[in-house]
Image (cartoon, helix red, strand yellow):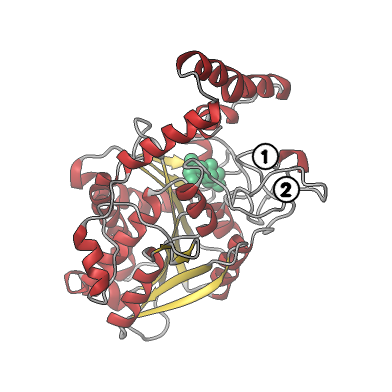
Amino acid sequence: MALGNLLIDRWRQVRTPSFVKMLCAHLFTRIIPTLCCSVLYGSSFDSVVTKLQATAIESENPPMEPEDEEWENRGGHRLSWTRYHRHKDEQVSFTSLIVSDIDSYLDYLAYTYTDICQTEIIGKSSQGRDLKLLKVSTGGKGKPAIWIDGGIHAREWISPATVTYILLHLVEFRDQHSELLDSVDWYILPLANPDGYEYSHSTDRLWRKTRSRVGGSRRGSGCYGVDPNRNWDFHWAPGSPSDSCREDFSGPRAFSEPETRAMSEFILSRQGEIKVYLTVHSYSQMWLVPWGYKEEKPRDYYEMYTLAEKGVEALEAIRGTDYLLGTAAELLYTAPGGSDDWAKGVAGIKYSYSIELPDTGDYGFVLPANQIEPVGQETWAAVKAIATHFADGHN
Ligand code: 0X9
Ligand code: ZN
């Protein structure tokens, strides 16, 4: 199912009568694959998909290096930027434990750099996982703040990896850019959709949504999950219960998801302080400026574009990666209920952007882990350029 979903994912945005879409979706996701599997492999479609998925993940994400294991024993952390990591310690059965990585890196930073780092659990996911944020600040009042979130979409593994890479440089190499810490506060949430992220590791590599049970009726119909980037309360468009199986199901109501609600409440509690909202997605190498819900541009688009341009120029200077810069509606498609539009339209954050990380489609969401470092380096360069603008006293 997941492979078929990927094929029709972008195409779904095209305006086509819904019965044609349904027919084609069924053709791509079920009929053609079922026929091919029984003819070519003599096995069922689902078992072929499971095997293909395991092989794809293994080549995308090689096993843990012995050095990483050692770190844990020395009381440090296991996060490396050479492979994709899980969210948090989880006892999956009596004997087997999936060991902590992303979440415990934040704890590690907080207890190692006590003077500047502080963790905060801003809420819980629908399956009860912590939404853990790291505040990085050298103290003092009235500084502009930058918010960065990653992992809103479960399958975009490069996003949380890049956000933790940014944390690594921001905090652990703080001496190289002390002015960015002295004059700017940072709120960083590397994994905004931990349930979906874990599910994309354990079960369906191409899962996009949350894992709430909102779409189902009492009789058990409907599907799991809501698209957390269609669920924000700004020009939110209702989806009908029959849409609950869609990848972009917007939910039964705006902020139905505890994840989006917790983020929005935290951001509103820092209204006026947060000057930049950055949400990190993949893929397509684009720096997206609101609006995404409609084709018109905001009145202050020119200023938003000019600051984004500084980020993109710094990014491209690292290794020449090409990024497109423009509104989400003009470069991708119009889609309501996105976090970037909400951050600007409701929270009043002037500089709100979605960054779509590499690549442009060769690997798509399944970007090999050896790309974490180069993508991290160039994205960190972009973030530094944005922060420098505020460190230089602009507003
Ligand atoms: O469709 C999305 O949510 C984003 N692209 S992705 O491939 N990562 O799913 C783009 C969001 C752009 N912003 C808005 N439409 N508001
Ligand atoms: Zn995304």
Is 268 in front, or is 391?
Answer: 268
* Residue 291 seen from this side: no
Amino acid type, mark 1: Cys
Q: Can you give x and y, in whole percent of width and height, for residue 101 in the image?
A: 36, 64
Task: Kindly identify the residue that appears in the image at 39 percent across and 36 percent down.
Answer: 364
Residue that numbered label 1 is attached to: 245
Q: Can you give x and y, in whole percent of width and height, for residue 49 in the image?
A: 49, 31
Mark 2 C-beta closer than 8 Å to ligand 1 = no
Q: Quadrant of the N terminus?
A: top right
Q: Pick whichever of labels 1 and 2 is earlier in the sequence.
A: 2
Residue at the limit of the structure toward the right, as seen here: 219
Q: Quadrant of the C terminus?
A: bottom left
Residue that numbered label 2 is attached to: 215
SS at badge 2: loop
Q: Is residue 348 above or below residue 139?
A: above
Q: Can you give x and y, in whole percent of width and height, for residue 195 in the image?
A: 54, 57
CA gap, disc 1 to disc 2? 8 Å
Q: Is residue 356 left or right of residue 175?
A: right
| Disc 2: CA contacts within 10 A as few (<14), some (14-19) or many (>=20) | many
Q: Is residue 344 above or below residue 372?
A: below
Say if mark 1 contacts mark 2, CB within 8 Å: yes
Is 65 in front, or is 18?
Answer: 65
Task: Kindly identify the residue that appears in the image at 27 percent across and 66 percent down.
Answer: 168
Q: Can you give x and y, in whole percent of width and height, for residue 346 in the image?
A: 61, 61
SS at badge 1: loop
Q: Is residue 292 left or right of residue 316?
A: right
Task: Kindly identify the residue that appears in the image at 49 percent across and 18 percent down.
Answer: 42
* Residue 394 seen from this side: yes
